Image: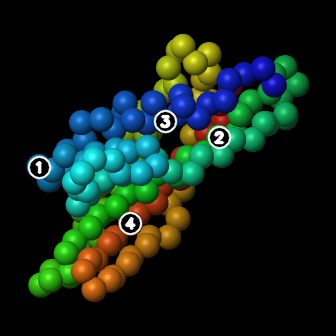
Amino acid sequence: MNKVLPDKWVRKSIYDAMNDMVISSTEIPFYDSRVTGSVIPPYYVLMTTQTNEVDKNNKCEWFWDSSILLDIVTVYGSQGNTGSRLMADDIADEVRSRINSIALDVGSGLEIITKTQSFPNDISTVTRNENIFRKLIRLEMTIK
């Protein structure tokens, strides 16, 4: 297959679509695989696991079956506040809406043919100091 690996182009298109997201007057930062900086925000989204497989079902040219997992994280201090999953739900709904319209940069030479979203189980973690609520969104694409 002589097409470029779509990973960096997928991340770029998602980042560009999410850059400037504000939910309930709070800016929601997007990160590539881990939070950077000296202060970890209470709400953020990670672009995590990516996969690619060559789809050989088309006789004329092969496609990529590509996916990326988006991890929406909300963190609350446990002292006197049990937290709520509402902010995670609101962020997930906005992310879901925005990834409907992403397209890969023309410079990539790639084009998204189909997009499918799935929503794996939520993850709730309670420690002595924090309540963490996570929502996951998997975006699967057929890329030409």
**Residue neighbourhood size for the residue with mark 4, other residues' Cα within 10 Å, grouped as few (<14), some (14–19), many (≥20):** many
- The residues tagged by marks 2 and 1 sit, at their Cα atoms, a distance apart of 33 Å
| 3 and 4 marks in contact (CB < 8 Å) | no
Labels 3, 1: front one: 3
Residue that appears at 53% across and 15% down = 106
Q: Is residue 97 visible?
A: no
Residue 115 horizontal side relative to residue 122, left or right: right
Q: Is residue 60 above or below residue 76?
A: above
Front-most of residues 38 and 125: 38
- Tell me the element at label 3: helix
What label sits on residue 66 in the rendered view? Answer: 2
Q: Residue furthest front?
A: 38
Question: Where does the image place residue 102, in percent across and percent down from the top left?
Answer: 45, 31
Q: Is residue 80 above or below residue 35?
A: below
Residue named by callout 3: 11
Q: Amino acid at mark 2?
A: Ser
| Residue 25: image tag | 1
* Mark toward the start of the polypeptide (2 vs 1): 1
Q: Position of residue 100 (x, y in %)?
A: 44, 38
